[in-house]
Structure formats: C-alpha cells, structure tokens
Image (cartoon, rainbow, N blue to C red):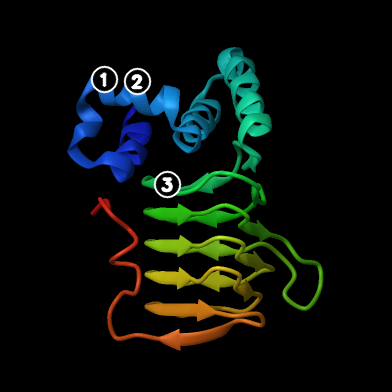
Amino acid sequence: MNKEIKKDLYRYIGEDCNKIICQLRYFLFTPGFQYIYFFRKAAAASKLTRLFWLIGLRFCMFKTGIQIPYTTKIGPGFRIVHFGSIVINPQTIIGKNFNISQGALIGNSSGKNKGVPIIGDNVCVNANAIIIGGVKIGNNVLIAPGAFVNFDVPDNSIVIGNPGKIISRDQSPTDKYIIYSLK
C-alpha cells in the first residue's frame, strides 16, 4: 500500500492503518475506501498499468455512485464518510484532510463565478451540499447538509442553508468532524 493511500486509511482508523488485516478489511468491506484506493492507484499509475486501475475505478463508480475522476487533485487524508451520489469536477483542487458525504456535488459554473472550486485543508462537506463555480473555500470550513455555496468562504467558517449563509468562528468548526487528521 503506498504512502498516499495509507494516509487516507489513517483518516478512517488511525494508527491501525499499518496492520495488514485492517488494510484488507477496509479494502474489501468499505466502499468509500475502495473507491479511494482505485482513485489513488489510477492517478499514480504508469500508462502501462493505468487501464487496469481505471477499470477498477469504473467498477467502483457503478457500485457506489461516486464520480471522482482520477485527474482530480485531492490532498492526503481523503475520507468518504458516506458513499453514494458524490460528484466532483475533475479540475477541482482539494487540500488535505477532506471529508465528503453522500449527495455532495462539487462542480463548475459558466455563470457569474465561472470556473471550479479550490478547497483548502480540513474541510468537511456534508450530505447534499453543493459547491459550484470558481470559488475559494478556506481552511477549517464546515459545509452543512443541504448548503448551496457559490461564493468564497473564509477560514474557520460554517456555511448553512440555501442560499448559503456564512457563520464565522474563532476556532475551527471541523475539529469534531475531521478525526485522525494529518498534521
């Protein structure tokens, strides 16, 4: 298991990520981690082996409903909290310690905020949240379930509602949600 995948698995189970039995269990029985595994392998593969990993990734896509192309730039510590109907634009850039839940959409826009999102470190995107357009999401941001975000979000904030409303915090609102975070 390569270092990047181990960092992702660490976000699920902490120090147990070094145990072979835990690695096997999460690969076989955790669909979100299975997708991450094939995603990382396809992204890092040579041209010769990429086809094999892309077939595995495609199989996971149909099985889980997750659509994250292998060209998407996602930092270490990627965690799919609940799988199902997750879509991320391939040009999106995401930092480390990123949580995403079912029904989330991170996509492009051709309107006022043309482009794709850039997302910082320690961000948690909850169920059915939508982030679209060329927006910047800061570090330590919590996107609440069902929130619609088409504007920049500063560090240490919570976004709630549709249309989204920013609630600023003095401390990180993601500390309770980003478990086993990478330093």
**Of the residues under marks 1 and 3, which one precedes in the sequence?**
1
Q: Which residue is mark 1?
A: 21
Q: Spot the residue most to the left.
A: 15
Q: Compared with residue 103, is residue 46 higher up or lower down, i.e. above or below?
A: above
Cα separation, mark 1 vs mark 3, equals 19 Å
Q: Is residue 132 above or below residue 180?
A: below
Q: Which mark is residue 175?
A: none
Percent from the top left, x then y, of residue 87? 66, 50
The amino acid type found where label 3 is placed reads: Arg
Q: Quadrant of the C terminus?
A: bottom left
Q: Which residue is mark 2?
A: 24
Task: Find out whether the residues at labels 3 and 2 contact each other: C-beta distance under 8 Å.
Answer: no
Disc 3 marks which residue? Answer: 79
User: Label 3 neighbourhood size at 10 Å, few (<14), some (14-19), many (20+)?
Assistant: many
Observer able to see residue 4: yes
Q: In the rendered view, would you say 56 is above or below 179?
A: above
Secondary structure beneath label 1: helix
* Circle 2/circle 1 CB separation < 8 Å: yes
The residue lying furthest to the right in this view is 111
Position in image of residue 85 (x %, y %): 65, 47
**Residue type at the position of mark 1:** Ile
Q: Quadrant of residue 141?
A: bottom left
Q: Quadrant of the N terminus?
A: top left
Q: Residue at x 37, y 70 (%)?
A: 140
Residue at 35% over, 68% down: 174
The amino acid pointed to by label 2 is Leu
